[in-house]
Every structure is written in structure tokens, then in C-alpha cells.
Amino acid sequence: MNPELIIVTPEHRPHIALIQINRPKELNALNLQVMGEIRDALKELDANENVRVIVLTGNERAFAAGADIKQMAGKDAVDMLLIDQFSTWDQIRKTKKPIIAAVSGFALGGGCELCMTCDMIVASETAQFGQPEIKIGVMPGAGGTQRLPRAIGKAKAMELVLTGKFMSATDAYNAGLVNRVVPPDSYLEEALRLAAEIAQQSPIAVQLAKESVLKAFEMPLQEALSFERKNFYMLFATQDQKEGMAAFVEKRKPEFKGR
Ligand code: CAA
């Protein structure tokens, strides 16, 4: 099925895929269809051997202004449980390739949670982050109460979640939520540049390194260290390890094949 509310370009740049959320009139509000399309696109791109890094973006005004309030407004708890709308989000977490969010404008509620579920965030100076669900009588439901404190600490996260106020791009950078803040006309280019830097590395090493970093948030330290160590040893089974180390010794640039 062709997506209708996102635009997917598998080879936007060599080895870099681009997904653009395209519901501009609704400020890219994340209804069930958008999230289903993002899930399907990520699954396909993760299985596509030509793709090494995925960039996810919105438009200048909004990365995404949250889950679709109009779609949720009339639902009761049983509807929500049966629809289980956040289960589509599991695919983002499961994606093995790095995902960089290129954020301009609003990244609110589910939009903030979506970019935090990505691996890195490049923000325009216009970006505004926040979890304003409290203002509509609910709370974050797609990871906001967990990922935000891990990213910016308990005190700042608590304030954002309990007041619903927004955080500027500069404050988000200073708090450690985003990787870099750039002028509005270059946020996507900067995200693609970062993606290109990662795409030059061995894709298997990138995948195992990403997996290991994520374990820092999911496992006790001893288990995570052991997980990391095994991934490190496993990389010695790859041609890319032989190539990378030989290239260093021979003082040349490595050519990684993803094998
Ligand atoms: N859901 C559905 N529609 C939305 C939306 C959302 N989250 N955010 C914006 N829209 C729609 C507006 O209803 C409006 O549509 P109409 O023109 O048909 O009225 C259109 O997008 C433009 O929005 P505004 O006119 O409100 O634009 P603005 O510039 O005045 O304000 C804004 C921008 C501050 C982002 C404001 O739209 C806003 O507060 N949006 C809601 C933000 C929010 O509460 N997000 C959390 C949602 S709940 C959630 O995400 C749960 C979770 O954990 C996953």
C-alpha cells in the first residue's frame, strides 16, 4: 500500500532514507494512519540493504503537534485498550538502523515522544518541545514520562510534564535533549549531513553499537556491560572489522561492505 500521509524516499542520499510526515493542515498530528504508515515504512527501510540511516522529519511549522486529539476525544478506556494505538510505536524502538529526527517548529506530546524515540535529534532554532497533555486532562502515553527524564533529568522533565509548557530549541540543547541546533533553513541538511557521517561506518558495527547504547536505558549496568562486550567480540566475525583494522594499519580509508 502506498502511504498517503507520509512521503518515503528510500534513497534520498546514498544509503540515507527520508521519511517526511505530511499532514500540514493538522500540524502533522499523529493519527492512527500516520503512525501505521511510519511503522510500515520503518519495517521496509530496516530490511532494505541499501539503507543505512533513516531521517524522520515534518515541515517547517511542525515536526508533529502530538497524537490526534480529535481522533481520541470521544474514546473511552476500553476503546483505547482495544485500539492500543501506541503498539504501532514499538516498531520505532525495534528499528535496527539509526533514526535521526530533523525537527522544526512544534514537537509536542506524541511529537516530542516520537523524536525522543529516534536515536538523535537535530533541531531548527524554531523548534519547540513539550508534553502538553496535562492541559487536555491526560498525560504522556508514548514514552514521555520515561524518556524525557532520562534525557533532561527528573526536575526539568517533571516541570514540563506537570505544567505542559514548551521548551525552546536552545534550552533543549542545553538540557541534553537534542544533538544540535541550527538555523531554520538548514536543519534538514544538517540531519542529512550527520546521517552521511554515520552511513560511512560499518553498518553492522553501527547496528550493534546502537543496540548497546539503548541497553544503557534498559538493563542494570553489569548485564549491559556484558551485552556490550559480546557485541564487541561478535564484530570480529565481520569482514568490516578486518577491513577497518587493515585500513588503519595500511594508512588508507576503509571500504565497509556491511558483511
Ligand atoms: N490533534 C489534532 N489536531 C491538531 C493537533 C493535535 N494534536 N494539533 C493541532 N491540530 C490542528 C488544530 O486543531 C487546527 O485545526 P483546524 O484548523 O481544523 O482548527 C490546526 O491543527 C492548526 O492548529 P492551531 O490553529 O491550533 O495552530 P496554532 O498555531 O494556533 O497552535 C499549537 C499550535 C500550540 C501546536 C496548538 O495547535 C496545540 O496546542 N495543539 C495541541 C498540542 C497538544 O496538546 N499535543 C498533545 C496531544 S495528546 C498526545 O500526544 C498523547 C500522547 O502522549 C501520544
Image: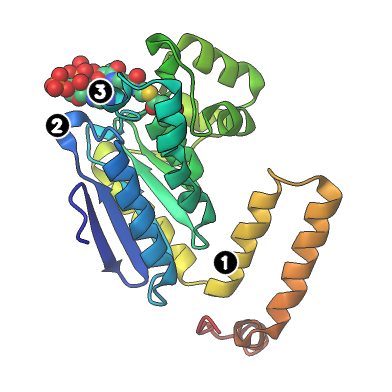
Q: Amino acid at mark 3?
A: Lys
Q: CA distance from mark 3 to mark 1?
A: 39 Å
Of all residues, the one furthest to the left in this rendering is 25
Residue 177 visible in the shown view = yes
Q: Is mark 3 within 8 Å of ligand 1?
A: yes
Q: Is 77 left, or right, of 65 in this rendering?
A: right
Q: Which residue is mark 3?
A: 70
Whether 226 is drawn above or below 174: the answer is below
Image coords of residue 148 (percent x, y)? 56, 29
Q: Amino acid at mark 2?
A: Lys
Q: Secondary structure at mark 3?
A: helix
Q: Earlier in the sequence, mark 2 or mark 1?
A: 2
Q: Is 43 left, or right, of 9 in this rendering?
A: right
Q: Secondary structure at mark 1?
A: helix
Q: Is 99 left, or right, of 259 in this rendering?
A: left
Q: Which residue is mark 2?
A: 25
Quarter of the image for the N terminus: give it. Answer: bottom left
Q: Secondary structure at mark 2?
A: helix
Q: Earlier in the sequence, mark 2 or mark 3?
A: 2
Q: Is mark 2 within 8 Å of ligand 1?
A: yes
Foreground tag (2 vs 1): 2
Whether 3 is drawn above or below 132: the answer is below
